[in-house]
Image (cartoon, rainbow, N blue to C red):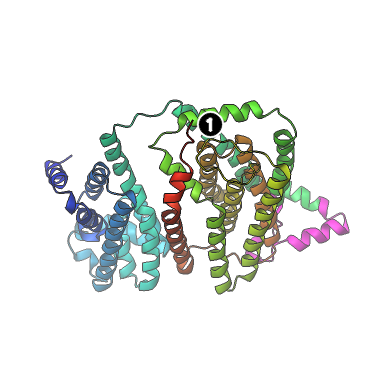
Amino acid sequence: MPEWIQALSAWLSQNPGWLAVALVLIAFIESLALAGLVVPGVALLFAAAALAGKTSMPVMEALAWAGLGAVLGDNVSFWLGRHFRGRLHLIWPVSRYPGVMIRGEHFFAQHGGKSVVLGRFVGPIRPVIPLVAGAFDMDGRRFLAFNLASALAWAPVYVLPGYLVGSALTEKIDLPPHLYPVLGASLGLLALAYLLFVRVQLRLDNSSAVYRRVQAFMAQYDTSHAFWRALTSQRPDRGGEFPLASLTLAVAATALFIIWSVLAVATDLLDPLNLLALDFFLTLRHPFFDPLALGLTLLGDALFLTLSAGLGILVLSWRGYYAAALHVGAALGIATGAVWLMKHGFAVPRPVTIMSPPESAAYPSGHAAGAAVLFGLIGSFVARELASQKRWRVYLAVLAPVILVALSRVYLGVHWLTDIVGGLLLGFAICGYVRASFSRYDHYPLRLDGPNVLLLVAWCALAAGYVTLVWPTAVIAYSPALS
């Protein structure tokens, strides 16, 4: 690390009151086109974030200051690009990096407004994308929407590593026992969900041999042929595709859910697994990981998922996507009703490991089911707009929060392992059926355009507000029970 960065870090350590200003300025400079090309903003930001962790600055405050600086830097770059359009290649330091400008222009021409979000994470062109957007006369309000969304994603990626390092150095955190086996088990669970949710989706599109064989079989009978035509998409660009992947996912998840429910509720064959998993995660509990698990579990709360779905329904209805809004509402209603009925019907008692366990029964996990439905639908709507060979990226991205929310329930000791597996299977089944029903409509709303970027920003604000509001009560409720 250069000496001047070490000197700046030492000064900030002695004057922590200036740390917020430093985070804003460093993020501003790192995002500013002319300065970001020559100033080592990443190293400076890491050092400032580490100091924020060492001085116990709240992590959300550090993220907010850095995000503010990034938004301001990109907005200034956008204005410079618009002001100096046609002369950008002559201005220092852009004139020293003509190749970077050419790659930035090509990237913007290829991806349009999305490049404002994607460009933050693409190495050398990161500082010039806002400059190019201004030079290409991108609409200012549309740029601001993409800019805000990209800052929400950028701040955690660039700030959290340094912040966690600073916190760890201060608190001298010891990793809890069995950390690596638990990480391995978590990855294994993610792999199983990936095989079910992703591979099924990718292997059964209308270009596969299996799809064509099923289509030929269904065409032999009037009833099955009418069913095939009723659910087939009317979009010309999709070639009349039947939702075979979604229905296969739904039927497979339903069958597995029934089998799993019989084993979990009607027999004691899985009881040793539940006890082993409970003891395993209780051993893992540590003050360093508790806030992360608590934040994840709050994002799976029934109230938060309902508010999230309500926000989506309002925006979809406002944009005229009434069928999509209706299906999102139906998915929420079906999931809520199914979980409530099964909890009361099965009446599986919860483990008693926290101060205030939920009053409802354990099986199936409503958090796991709700997260699987909500994020699964989002992923399937987004993936529908992509070529089949690229959809796995979206499915994998939405599976990660679903698995993390589910595992947080076992980590906190409010669910058995069988509860979350059952909840995931139920959620995937509902997601598959609802997605298959929606396939006949020719409008798929989740593209990365301005209104949907604003929807993402509003959802992030909703998540932050909800977690902040219920956090004090949740910390007490989820504290380990006194032995």
Q: Is residue 299 magenta?
A: no
Type of amino acid at the residue the image marks with label 1: Ala
Q: Position of residue 349 (x, y in %)?
A: 65, 38
Q: Position of residue 386 (x, y in %)?
A: 56, 56
The quadrant in which the N terminus is found is top left
Q: Nearer the viewer, residue 135 or 229?
A: 229
Which residue in the rendered view is the most extreme toward the front?
482
Q: Which residue is labeled 1 in the image?
A: 185
Q: Position of residue 113 (x, y in %)?
A: 41, 65
- From this viewpoint, is residue 207 visible? no
| Disc 1 crowd, CA 10 A, few/some/many (<14, 14-19, 20+) | few
Q: Residue at x 69, y 44 (%)?
A: 253
| Residue 285 in the figure: left or right of residue 208 | left
| Residue 243 in the figure: left or right of residue 167 | right
| Residue 225 in the figure: left or right of residue 319 | right
Q: Residue at x 17, y 61 (%)?
A: 92
Q: Is residue 229 magenta?
A: yes
Q: Position of residue 272 (x, y in %)?
A: 63, 26
- From this viewpoint, is residue 155 visible? yes
Q: Nearer the viewer, residue 213 or 26?
A: 26
Q: Residue at x 66, y 54 (%)?
A: 335
Q: Secondary structure at mark 1?
A: helix
Q: Which residues are magenta?
A: 217-245
Q: Nearer the viewer, residue 268 or 248?
A: 268
Q: Indicate whether 182 appears above or below 13.
A: above
Image quadrant of residue 174? top left
| Residue 117 in the figure: left or right of residue 14 | right
